[in-house]
Structures are given as structure tokens and as C-alpha cells.
Amino acid sequence: MGTTTEGIRHVRNLIGGTWRPAVSGLTISRENPADTDQTVATCPASAAEDVAEAIAAAKAAAPGWAATDVRERIGIIGRALDILGERAAELATADVLESGKTLAECEGEIARALAATGYQLEIAPGLLYGERSLPSGLDVEMTRSPVGVAALITPWNYPFSAVIRKSVPALVAGNTVVVKPSELTPVTAEITGAALTEAGLPPGVFNLVYGTGQDAGAPLVDDPVPGAISFTGSTRVGLAVARDTGGRDVKVQVEMGGKNPLVILADADLDRAIDAAVSASYTAAGQWCIATSRIIVEEPVFEEFRDRFVARTRQVRVGDGLSEGTDMGPVSSKVQYDKVLSYLRPDTLTGTVLVGGGAHTGEDVANGYYIQPTVVERPDPASALVQEEVFGPVVSLLCATGLDDAIRLANDTSYGLCAAVFTRDTDRARRFAAAVDAGRVGINMPTSVGDHHVPGGGRKNSGRGEYEGAEDGIVFFTHLKPVFIPR
Ligand code: NAD
């Protein structure tokens, strides 16, 4: 593991069971997004040679891990999840410091990720092997063999969750992994590597290589060894990964951005709809793929919804994620801060800013990347604000003349991750669910609804390949090989 000096965690790569710096010796510093005067961590600025070493270690360890009985694999990974559960408070604090989210959000992230991966350990044996007798008189053993080495590339917004939710299904299926976490959030990944090591995972089965996307991510994607690549991140990079691997003998799963619509029909329970809108719009300062970023309200209740939603938005308390009473932390980085504010520039903004509209300032937040929770009424549906993933606490409020118009507006972006509708009319809800282009739909639930017993993914520019999570999340990291035997 790395070292800590003056509160700064110096994280290392984990390659073949050894914690080590980048071959170049170079490092990347991570500032606290809530207080940019504070350095939280440094991590190796790895490059192609570090990635090659990690791939070699994973390749060498692959046959042994694949041959390890699945029960033994589950025992080791389960012990690691227990260790991570015991270290949950430390993980949550590290998560706040590196991602900027609030402590409650980070605690929730960790608990949900441990529950989801624990569930995958339960279902793995039944998925990886099964026997059937066929009407033809044959018996068949349905075996699912590992792909070998899996390359896992993760974003900064849910750093612990993203790493563990890819690693556990890959590992339990018998693969070895090379993980390239976001260079902005190195610490929770290091704790995950330490827990797996302490639990008895053999050297080389779980490898961590830190670095930028260009220097460490791209060589990992280009490497011919991995049999599977699972990427979560922006649509720009995700589409490039899908394109660049096309035609190669590698399974590719790409989870990308969203521009998720919440539709409020005239007969909706507005109390519940407003709760759902506030929570899904401002959690993680809007930096989660399942955030509500467009709210489409049917005309008869537009004004009432608007006024009540704006009043609730004014109550969102912005501050340091570690401070008591904070509802919403800063955005994660200077890049993100500038990007979100660029959508609110008066020279390009269309519509009316009802609340917020810029940086959140004040003595206690002077050194952080704080942005006001913002609602923009009736922006141009063709504008960048409505069409692109802002990934910040900025909501576009649109008015629909009826259900068909709401569906049209909901589908009018290149994304298709998730959607939600509020109505008391079951038929109208079902019509919306059937017509909306989304990987998942909530009825009288927020766009962020989900359950770890169910896989998740996106359509259009939100996803490519098999879904993550639950059964599909394990199946992705395998090849089906039916073995036929005469009865
Ligand atoms: P990003 O695309 O910038 O980076 C994601 C990861 O890819 C990082 O580890 C980065 O270093 C790496 N990377 C960057 N360029 C690369 C390249 N050329 N080759 C290989 N790897 C490269 O995304 P981000 O800003 O870290 O994350 C935010 C995005 O993630 C948002 O768009 C969000 O919607 C998306 N996201 C999606 C889901 C989902 O399940 N659909 C979940 C969380 C986040």
C-alpha cells in the first residue's frame, strides 16, 4: 500500500501482488473539490509500460484463478467484502474527500455496492454451471468459462461503487482483472485492492493501474490480451472505446452518460413527484448518470409544479460534504466546474433562470467548486443545455401539451439511460413506459430508481453491450460453452 504524509495519501499501483509507483516515477495530485487548497492524494501517472506489466501479471495469474473452485473464489471475495464493510467509515470519508459528494451519499454508495456485489456472489454458482436434460435424449452441461483477463475502466463520480461492481462479477466468474480507476479518485480503489489482498486473493488476480485516460486508459483498451473490457464514463470516450474495439475478439460493455427525463402528468401526486425531482436532480450535485436533468410537466400543473419545485430547490443546502447539514457538495473538478457554468453563460442560455444560475459563493465555500442548484424554465429544446449531459445541478423545465408531447420531448435527445413518469393513471404510465427510449423506467419513482437484483444499462448513446449488475453483470465476463453428453 501507499503512504500518508501530512494527511495526503500517496497511492500506488498494485501489480502482481506488489504495490509500486509508476515506472516513470511520475505522480498525479488530487485536490479536495470542497477546498482546493487541500491535496487529498497522489497516485502514479502510469503509462503504457505500467499497463503492460499489469496485463502480464493478470495473464500469468489467469489459469490458476480460473481453475480455483468457484466456492473458494466466493469465500475469498466474500471475506474482502466483509473487510470493506468493516472499513466503511474510512471508505466513506475518503470518498467524500476525493469525489466531493456528501458523507450520507458516500455511505449510501458503499452500502449499496456491497449489497449488490454480495448478491452476485450468491447467484454466481447457479449462473456459471447448470445441467439440463434435452428432449433429443442428450444431457447438456451449461458451463460458463471466464474470458481470461478483464480490463475495467471507471469514472470518478461513484469511485468505490464503479470499481467493486465491475471487479466482483469479473473475479467470481474466474477472470483476473486490470482496473484503471479515475485518476481523480484513487483512494477508495486502493482500499479495495488492500481488502482483496488481505482476504487472500492470489497475486496478479486484481491489478490496479492509475493514470490519465490517455496515458493509461488508452493502452489498456488497445491491448490485445483482455477478453473483456468494461468501461463506465462519458459518452465521448465510451463511443470511442466501442468503435476502436469493434471487430476484435473482445467482449465490450460500455456504460455512458444520460439526459434523463422526469415526466409529470396532470394527475400526478405532486408531493411525491417533487420529492423525486429534488432528490434525483441534486444528489451528487447532479453528477450521476441517473440524475434527472429534464423535467417535462403537463400544461395544467406546470405552474404549480414549477413554483413548488423552485421553492424546494432554494432549500437545498450547499456546502462541504463532511459538514453536518449539507445536502449538496461541490462538483468534482475545475474541468467539471467550468463545463457546468459554460451551459449557463447568458450569451448562449435560452429560457429563464428561476433559481441559481451560477457559482455558489460564500466565505465557507470560498475554495471549492460549488455551483448553485439551478432551474431553467422553458429553454430551447434544441439547445445544448437540453440536449447534452451537463453533469451538474442544473435542471431544464419543459412544458408538454399532453402525454404524446411529453413522450416526444422525452425521446428528443441522443441519450437513453433512464426515465420516469408520475401519474395516477396506470394506462398512461404504461403507454409512457412502452414508448420511452430508456434502459429503465420508473413509474411514480425517480429516474434514479434501481434495485441490485436487476441489471442496468442504457440505450442509444447511453450504453453498448450487455447490462451491468445482477445476473447479466456476471454473464458478461464469461463465454457460454454447452457440453453435450448422450444420456
Ligand atoms: P471519462 O470518460 O472522462 O472517464 C472515465 C474513465 O475513462 C476514467 O478512468 C478516464 O481516465 C478513462 N479514460 C478517459 N479517456 C480515455 C481513453 N481515451 N481511453 C481509455 N480510457 C479513458 O468520464 P468521467 O468524467 O470520469 O465520468 C463521468 C461520466 O461517466 C458521465 O458522462 C456519466 O454519465 C458517466 N457515468 C455513467 C454511468 C452509467 O452507468 N451509465 C455511471 C457513472 C458515470
Image (tube, rainbow, N blue to C red):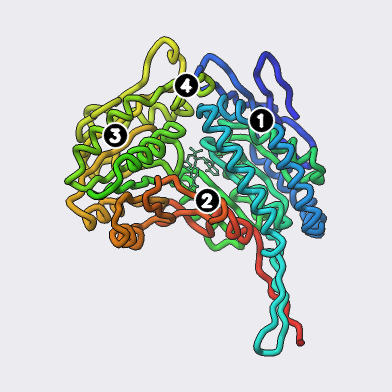
Q: Is residue 419 visible?
A: yes
**CA gap, disc 1 to disc 3?**
44 Å
Q: Report helix, strand or loop for mark 1.
A: strand
Counting from the top left corner in percent of width and height, residue 24 is at 69, 30
Q: Mark 4 points at which residue?
A: 325
The residues bearing labels 1 and 4 have C-alpha atoms spaced at a distance of 35 Å
Going from N to C along the chain, the mark reached first, 2 or 1, is 1
**Which mark is first along the chain, 3 or 1?**
1
Quadrant occupied by the N terminus: top right
> In the image, what residue type sits under mark 2?
Asp
Mark 2, other Cα within 10 Å: few <14 / some 14–19 / many ≥20: few
- Residue at 48 percent across and 56 percent down: it is 464
Residue named by callout 3: 309
Residue at left offset 60%, top offset 53%: 229
Residue 86 lies, with reference to residue 168, above or below; the image says above
Q: Mark 1 points at which residue?
A: 44
Residues at circles 1 and 4 in contact by the CB criterion of under 8 Å: no
Badge 4: few (under 14), some or many (20 or more) residues near its Cα, within 10 Å? few
Residue for badge 2: 451
